[in-house]
Amino acid sequence: MGEILMKGGEYMDSKKFRSLMVLNGDTNDSLADYLGITAASVSKKINENGSEFKQHEIARIKLRYKMTAEQVDSIFFNW
């Protein structure tokens, strides 16, 4: 469990993403501030079907957490 079905049939690995947030000292509030969205939006994008991170948000998250392309794929595009 921990995988959220996204549009297009991909799965977001929400547990892996939450772990990455914790390792980087982030909360929904701090990540939301960085992305320019609400903490509720971050929560929905992590936990619920029908709402997902947009491409530009994923790009900013990649920079914030110094992620490799492989890490991005394993979290956001986990087929």
Image (spheres, grey):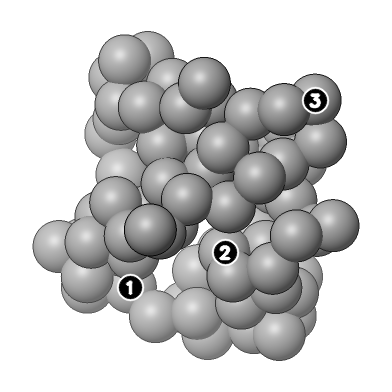
Q: Position of residue 51 (x, y in %)?
A: 80, 58
**Residue at point 57%, 64% (across, down):** 46
Q: Amino acid at mark 1?
A: Asp
Q: Which is nearer the eye, 71 or 49?
A: 49
| Residue 20 percent across, percent down from the top left | 25, 55
Q: Quadrant of the N terminus?
A: bottom left
- For badge 2, the amino acid type reads Ile
Among numbered discs 1 and 2, the one appearing first in the sequence: 1
Question: Which of labels 1 and 2 is toward the front?
Answer: 2
The crowding category of the residue bearing disc 1, from other C-alpha atoms within 10 Å (few below 14, some 14 to 19, many at least 20), is some
Q: Residue furthest top?
A: 69
Image disc number at residue 8: 3
Classed neighbour count for the residue bearing mark 2: other residues with Cα under 10 Å, few (<14), some (14–19), many (≥20):
many
Q: Nearer the viewer, mark 1 or mark 3?
A: 3
Residue hosting label 1:
26
The quadrant holding residue 71 is top left
Residue 58 location in percent, x, y?
A: 59, 37
Task: State the mark number for residue 12.
Answer: none
Q: Is residue 56 left or right of residue 70?
A: right
3 or 2: mark nearer the eye:
3
